[in-house]
Amino acid sequence: MKITARVDKGTPVEVYYDFPENLSGLADALGDDVVYGKALDSLVIDIQALVRRHLKGGKETPPKSAEEIQAIVSAWTPGTRGPRKTAGEKVRGLVSNMSKEEKAALLASLQED
């Protein structure tokens, strides 16, 4: 597998590592404890990101309480994403950050088409 990394905006470095192609291959090569530990680390990071998203809230959603976040975490399934924003929701989020002048210019350009 090719892995790319860089520091800040420096030149990226590509390295290769020969990972086994499936879970049993990983367990054979690295050991069950390593595979379990790495999977657990990744799952904890995913939950931390989920919690942070809901603690912060968004443009259209207020921050949630600890109880609400616990309910979200309890219902969470690894490897799945929540509902995605519609195109309209994405546009509204972007446009909400624009000045009145920018909105007017955008509207004018859309009406030209």
Image (tube, rainbow, N blue to C red):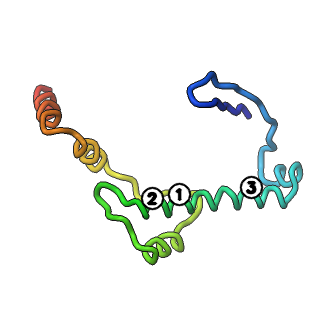
Find residue 53 and name its label.
2
The location of residue 48, given as percent across then percent down, is 56, 61
Find residue 26 and name its label.
none
Find residue 49 and name its label.
1
The location of residue 30, given as percent across then percent down, is 86, 51
User: Disc 3 to disc 1, how far (Cα)?
Assistant: 17 Å
Q: Is residue 32 above or below residue 90?
A: below
> Which one is in front, 33 or 62?
62
Say which amino acid is labelled 1. Answer: Ala
The answer to whether mark 3 and mark 1 are in CB contact below 8 A is no
Q: Residue furthest front?
A: 8
Find residue 38 and name its label.
3
Say which amino acid is labelled 3. Answer: Lys
Q: Is residue 6 above or below residue 60?
A: above
> Which one is in front, 9 or 106?
9
Instruction: Say what secondary structure mark 2 lies in.
Output: helix
